[in-house]
Amino acid sequence: MIKLEALSAIDSATFLQKNEIADFLFEHLGKYGDPKEDIMKCLDYALDSGIRAGGFVVLARDKGELVGALVMNKTGMSGYIPENILVYIAVDAGQRGKGIGKKIMDMAIKMANGAIALHVEPDNPAKKLYERLGFTNKYLEMRLTK
């Protein structure tokens, strides 16, 4: 039985909890992921109680084992930029196709105050889930990396 849990700044996540989540995301995001150090920065931001930071984490566990994770960051903005950005979501490769990703997303959508943005690669199979949940492609993102 899959159990969902949420973490926010008020939960005071420990380094070990953040490390477990970062290891899971690093492993299961695969080619769509980032270096573990970047995932840890994202978790630090999401679980920070500061005025300019914040967000939350949604975890899915099966018999205590982590099988899915999502990290949402608050942007501190609204209107011209959505209030939230879904930074990471991953489901254990052996657990995909069982609706875990949808359950995690449903909980995150309920928890988020305001609009949600996310970035997804065109070939990412999760794109179909996001579209079923009502996400639309409003813009083409462009970046200049310096």
Image (cartoon, helix red, strand yellow):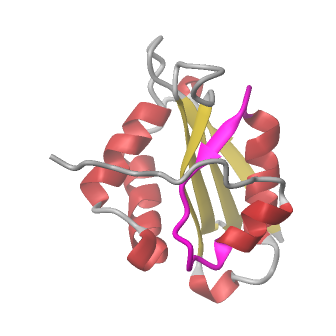
Pick out the residue farthest to the top: 51
Would residue 40 be found to the left or right of residue 49 on screen? left
Residue pictured at 28% horizontal, 62% vertical: 35
Query: Which segment is the magenta one?
Result: 112-126
Rendered residue at 74%/53% (across/down): 136
Q: Is residue 52 above or below residue 72?
A: above
**In the drawing, does residue 87 fall left or right of residue 7?**
left
Q: Position of residue 17 (x, y in %)?
A: 45, 49
**Residue with the most extreme bottom position:** 94
* Image location (x, y in percent) of residue 27: 41, 75
Chief secondary structure of the magenta span? loop
Residue 64 position within the rendered picture, expressed as x and y whole percent measured from the top left: 65, 66
**How many labels were placed on the picture?**
0
Residue under the image location 69 percent in, 61 percent down:
60
Image quarter where the N terminus lies is bottom right
Residue 58: within the magenta?
A: no
Q: Is residue 108 above or below residue 132?
A: above
Q: Residue furthest left?
A: 146
The answer to whether 93 is drawn above or below residue 41 in the figure is below
Residue at image x 46%, y 65%? 25
> How far across and down, in percent of the image, does residue 66 sit?
59, 67
Query: Can the viewer see residue 21 in this picture?
Result: yes
- Asked whether residue 3 appears in the rendered view, the answer is no
Q: Does 113 appear in magenta?
A: yes
64 and 130: which is toward the camera: 130
